Image (cartoon, coloured by chain):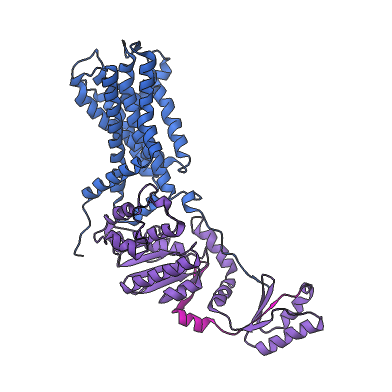
Amino acid sequence: MAESLPSPLRLLVRQVGYQNRKFRRVPVAAFFTLAFPLIFLLLFGTIYGDGEIFARGHLMKFTQFYAPGLAVFTAVSATYTNIGISTAIDRDEGILRRVRSTPLPRWVYLGGVVTSGVSIALVGALIMLFVGIGLYGVEVNVGGLPAAATTFLVGTGSFAMLGLALAALAPSGQSSPALANATILPVAFVSDVFIPIGDAPGWLRFIGNVLPLKPFVEAFSNAFDPFQAGSMWDLTLLVRIGAWGMFGALVAAWRFRWDPSVGSAGRRRRGPLVRRSQSIS
Amino acid sequence: MDGLSFHVEPGEVFALLGPNGAGKSTTVEILEGHRTRDVGTVEVLGCDPELASAAFRDRVGIVLQEVGIERELTVREVVAHYGACYSRCRPVDEVLELVGLDGLGDRRTHQLSGGQKRRIDLALGLIGDPELLFLDEPTTGFDPSARRQAWEMVDGLRTLGTTIVLTSHYMDEVQALADRVLVIAGGRAVAEGTPDELRGSMVRGTSIRTRFPVGAEGTVEGLLGGLSGRARVLGGRLEVRTEEPTADLHRLTTWALDRGLELEDLEVVRPTLEDVYLGLLDDYPESVEDGVAHIGPSDG
């Protein structure tokens, strides 16, 4: 063969652009991922104004507490929730099956999905932080930003893996939104996203600490803690997040399916051949 | 599938013909590398499709049944994107014209009709300039004029030298398109040859047909036992396939006259290939059921 297959890297870049374009063309998904958490920040900021809240051992402004946590929540929506739902739906519609018919390597496809999710997460988190800083004077510990950026990459990568695991375990595309929300929303309530978990009973805090969202919020918020200075590296938190990412990747590798589930909309069975005759001889 | 064996020559249009549940899609999915076989040997373009390497996929175009298309994107975006995965990507506009989608490139795919979406499937099968193209029931769900257009399209591909393996449950489609046909039912090969050969070997005898007389149900067994041909009731009509039309027609009319029955719409005809095909499937009623059971619910 004179021509050779396009390089995987070029294909990956294309795939990321393709996935991003798909995301942009569905305004509802973009709204829920990017605007919905932002509305929370605007609401909290409007309701509480300059009021203070006791969180992470200190009294701080409400928005100082909420902006980084909601930025992480946005990032998790863009990875775990979006990837989990859209991949399960794409599987039901047979799009994954079509991908498998082409020479596109599977890892390039999945890599495109993950990278696209991470890039959307980055956009959403930046919007959240800029609104927080610009509108509510959220303080930034500049020295902690490299650690926060690293946390963000580890966190979004891990939640993207958990999203693939969710898609792998969801019985159908239809059930995937319920599964995604039923798992992430309760977790967010014990992870310092919507309310500080500090005063909650010990067992509830324990649950929050065992799950991956709280470490993500904690490690990321370190860069936005007005009572701290310095680089704020916390490897323990990163390992705890990354371990969940590994777990997600293993589940996805174990159970991921490229073919539509039997009886799903994408592969409805047609009726049997109308048997026009009955032999009576 | 049981004991199925066939060989497709380069540049040939080869058809697998059979009813739903016969095992056509299963066979094609094994050839495409979408399904693993339990036993047997399969070689496609010198590769084992089960290994499904990118180099293999690069040379094969697949038009699947009932697979989705990204709804939010335009026809051109989808075709160009998948095309970029191949080493020999055909120009997008050329392919859109080939499948009759020229002028619709900037439409979102969800705005297209079912037949137009099927053309996107075909465009995606062709965009990589394949040596071998699989067409799994390319015209199921088409209206007659769309089918005719699709046939012309496939005929156009033949002139490009593409080898085509197609499945169909329409005899007329296979007659119009295929160089060679394998008829399968219940996971087994029933007949193989060119459409003309099939006609020669399968179309035998004469059909005597009539509307089944009202009130004659009770006495019909005696009549049928006396006929030399094979009789069946087709939707309120009696059909006798016979090698002795004169004698059987006599027996039939005698039976009717004795009972004062009128044989309405009585005709004596030579069966079409379609009739023969349907008759052939009647010989495999149980095996057809078996085939469905073994192939499993995901078979189309």
Q: Image point 26% across, 55% down: which residue?
A: B84
Tell which of B33 and B17 is nearer to you.
Answer: B17
- Name the residue nearer the viewer: B100 or B157: B100
Residue furthest to the right in view is: B259
In the image, farthest residue toward the bottom: B246
Name the image quarter holding residue B27: bottom left
Is A19 positioned to the left or the right of B270 in the image?
Answer: left
Looking at the image, which residue is at 20% across and 62% down? A3
Where residue A179 appears, x then y in whole percent? 45, 35
Q: Is residue B39 magenta?
A: no
Number of marks in the image?
Answer: 0
Residue B211 among magenta residues: yes
B276 sits left or right of B182 in the view: right
Q: Position of residue A243 (x, y in %)?
A: 31, 31
Which residues are drawn in magenta?
B185-213
The percent coordinates of residue B156 (x first, y second) are 35, 71
Q: Is residue A213 visible?
A: yes
Residue B5 visible here: no
- Residue extending farthest front: B103
What shade has chain B been given? purple
Q: Colour of chain A?
A: blue
Q: In this rendered view, identify the residue nearer to me: B127 or B130.
A: B127
Q: Position of residue A158 (x, y in %)?
A: 31, 34
Is the residue B185 above or below the residue B86 in the image?
A: below
Position above or below: A240 against A102: above
Q: Is residue B256 above or below residue A122?
A: below
